[in-house]
Image (spheres, rainbow, N blue to C red):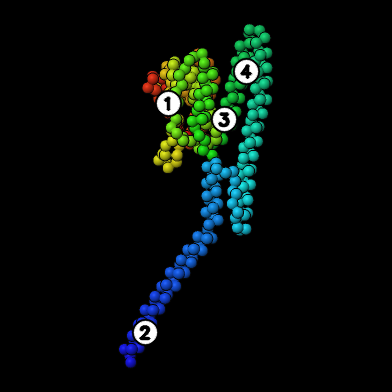
Amino acid sequence: PRTRVDQAVGAFRSTLQWWLGGAALLLLLLQTAMLVWILKPLRQVATELQAVEAGRQKQLEGNYPRELRPLTENLNGLLRSSRARLRRYRNGLADLAHSLKTPLAVLRSSAETLPDEHRTTVSEQIRRMSDTVDYHLQRAATSGRSPLSVPVQVRPEVARIVASLQKVYHDRSLEIDIAVEPDTVFIGEPGDLIQILGNLGDNACKWARHRVQIEARNVTEADKRQRLVLAIDDDGPGIPDELRETVTDRGVRADSRTPGQGIGLAVVREMVVEVYGGRLEISRSDGGGTRIEVHV
């Protein structure tokens, strides 16, 4: 009888273990399913935020549970507020630029009527005021990269800048080549990209003898972040080695005989290095001129 009892107890224990194991597995599956179902709205929020960041939509549009609505409504309010604040800021800068430029233009015209002994001094001070206004307006207009920056297609912006440069320097018959890889993007504000391209392109065309080349591509650097590598080459006289460290300082020009304000490269350096945390490198181009490469 004892053997039968032991066998019965052993069979019961074995059956109990199977049932308890099955119940535990079932509870684990149920718990996993519940977690997946409960976290689904949060995954949807993350997906929509990625779509906002990529520029595919302007705000969160999903139908969320009551518990998450305060979060999604606050996020949408933050997005609207940020865009409105940036728009007001840029409009204010445009108004400031207009209000300052007009009086300076009047002063510049009036200075031409002054006697020779005063005209040079007054014109020089007006030019310095105008240069300072240009420099600080360009600095202030820099927006920088934000988590919600929309990727900007680089090739159309390069094409627009090149078209403008060809009009400005049409009497020079410069050859401006574009070598931009397909789908190259800039993660930042379009205005910042235009300022970088415009300043570097204008500087290259100013010094080039016959040819300017603009290259752009995306790379993934050691910090795992995708950056834009933009390089502009010219076949001009080049920047002397002793000036490469200082030519990006405000007011410094490689040749004072060439017209310019000496602020273009300074603005680009501050924008690339200080605002975007990138780097700017100056070297000798294959054509004997200057190659300026920025990683931003």
Image quarter in which the N terminus is found: bottom left
Specify which label sits upstream in the sequence, 2 or 4: 2
The label nearer to you, 3 versus 4, is 3
Residue 11 horizontal side relative to residue 115, left or right:
left
Specify which label sits upstream in the sequence, 1 or 2: 2
Q: Which residue is mark 1?
A: 282
Q: Which mark is residue 139?
A: 3
Q: Which residue is mark 4?
A: 126
Q: CA distance from mark 1 to mark 3?
A: 21 Å
- In this rendered view, identify the residue nearer to me: 227 or 40: 40
**Residue at 52% across, 17% down:** 169
Q: Which mark is residue 9?
A: 2
> The residue under label 3 is which amino acid type?
Arg
Q: CA distance from mark 1 to mark 4?
A: 31 Å
Mark 2 residue element: helix
The label nearer to you, 2 versus 3, is 2
Specify which label sits upstream in the sequence, 3 or 4: 4
> The residue under label 4 is which amino acid type?
Ile
Q: Residue furthest bottom?
A: 1
Q: Is residue 179 visible?
A: yes
**Callouts 2 and 3 close, C-beta under 8 Å:** no
The label nearer to you, 1 versus 2, is 2
- Residue 150, given in percent of the width and then of the height, sits at 54, 39
Q: Mark 4 Cα within 10 Å, few/some/many (few <14, many 20+)?
A: some
> The residue under label 2 is which amino acid type?
Val
